[in-house]
Amino acid sequence: MQDILIKNGLIVTARETVRADLLITDGLIAAMGESLDRAGAVVIDAADQYVMPGGVDVHTHLNLTVGGLKVSDGFFEGTAAAAFGGTTCVVEHPSFGPAGCSLMHQVQSNRREAEKSCVVDFGLHGVFQHLNSQILEEFPTLLAEGVSSSKIYLTYDGRLTDQQILTVLERSKKSGLLTAFHAEHHDIIDFLTQKFRGENKQAPMYHPLSRPDYCEAEAVYRIISLAEAAGDVPVYIVHLSTAAGLKVIEAARGRGLPVYTEVCPQHLLLEDSCYEEPESKGLKYIMAPPVRKSADSAALWRGLAEGSIDVVATDHCSFTFADKLARGRNDFSLAPGGIPGVETRLPLLFSEGVLKNRISLNRFVEVVSTAPAGLMGLSPRKGSLDPGGDGDVVIFDPNIEKTITPDILRQNADYSPFEGRVVRGWPTTTIVRGTVVVQNGQLLVEKGWGQYISRHQTEIISTVEGD
Ligand code: DUC
Ligand code: ZN
């Protein structure tokens, strides 16, 4: 493997911004300093560009199948899109598996598939869909296999009851596993959806109305209460979307409870008027939780800047507009939920966050790379440019201006929910473990270059008592 020397760039990490060169040897970060030299190294000139730790997206569904419908990308196309967007490691949330399957079932089947296909590194979350003694016995195996977090849904058919959640939380703390939560109140959503159907209110604009903000706030409050009862167990709320939910989280954090949160670009940048786009185009934005109001996005930006929101991930789940139309034209609730986003996360957050002075440049790196790597048990390999870590680097040109359209994106989707938005700042080179994966718009590695990353117990679960 050839050494790589990145010269003349501005190094940006969560901690600092320095003008320096960066040396990668044997796939690992070796040194940062002025006027570095290395015989035989491939030299990349990063003049006028930022050199940052590779993006870490800890919420993707690149391989999801739901209701017999598979997302449009799969691990190869999905991780190629990630690499084009400056992301060097993803952590996939697998779909629910066959009824009654073991906890390891979805992890093992997704790992087999991903190892053949990924072009960036990947980890896997576990997913709970029922609970029994066999599942409880699998907790240590999960961590031993590098799966240090698992998700519980409060909605959908695979949701757990409060009693089951208490059991999982208690056992997770003992076993050193972090529990992530999809926080929506199932019965309210079901009730409102049926009510709208009965009134013939089936256009996309009824999607956010069927999942009001109090559905999220109630679910977040319940999760935090259950975690408190189970012994102040750390919890991670995925895709927070509302000011009401954030308020609950901030109150809990104010009381010292270990509650961590992720937000996605769609909830920072889109407004619920999108559901009224003509010709059923509102279906493009069917996702759960839905796009909210501008007051919600404003609160989420504030939380991100102040630190009560820890991570920006994507919930990338690339159902095509064609599939959404085919199923949801006459009833929004039948359209598959999810949007593409893994490729546009860094440009959108830089352009809308840093350039609009909502977050600093170092906070940008923190929320797209360093914090998710730490919370999800990927550091010190991922998320920094510290010597000894993986040589995962994105070179990012802050002056490239692009208008987002599906044609300029690598992702295998027939639309982008951010279509028409002009952004400044785009990745030009993506390096994974010291190998250039994307440069000058070309994918330079074969399918399967990405490696499975065995994640360790996350740094926020410190009170392991053994299992
Ligand atoms: N919500 C979505 O919109 N898609 C995938 C999973 C989810 O919870
Ligand atoms: Zn998701």
Image (spheres, grey):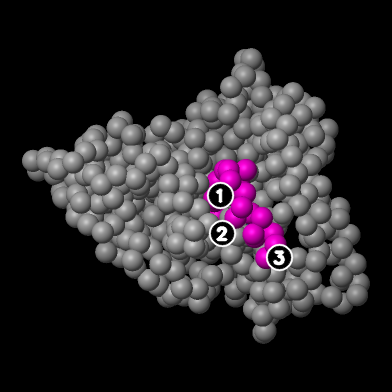
Amino acid type of the residue tagged 3 in the rendering? Lys
Residue at image position (73%, 73%) is 204
Residue occupied by mark 3: 293
Nearer to us of marks 3 and 2 is 3
Q: Residues within 10 Å of mark 2 (few under 14, many from 20)?
A: many
Residue at image position (66%, 69%) is 271
The number of numbered discs placed on residues in the rendered structure image is 3
Q: Which residues are magenta?
A: 294-316
Residue occupied by mark 2: 265
Amino acid type of the residue tagged 1 in the rendering? Ala
Nearer to us of marks 1 and 3 is 1
Disc 2 versus disc 1: distance between alpha carbons? Answer: 14 Å
Q: What quarter of the picture does the N terminus occupy? A: top left
SS category of the residue bearing label 2 = helix
- Quadrant of the rendered image containing residue 193: bottom right
Which label belongs to residue 305? 1
- Residue 447: horizontal and vertical position, in percent? 36, 53
Nearer to us of marks 2 and 1 is 1
Say which label, 2 or 1, has the lower sequence index. 2
Above or below residue 373? Residue 317 is below
- Relative depth, front residue between 329 and 37: 37
Q: What quarter of the picture does the C terminus occupy? A: top right
Residue at image position (65%, 60%) is 297
Say which label, 1 or 3, has the lower sequence index. 3
SS category of the residue bearing label 1 = helix
* Horizontal side of residue 266 vs 427, given as left or right: right
* Horizontal side of residue 368 vs 184, given as left or right: left
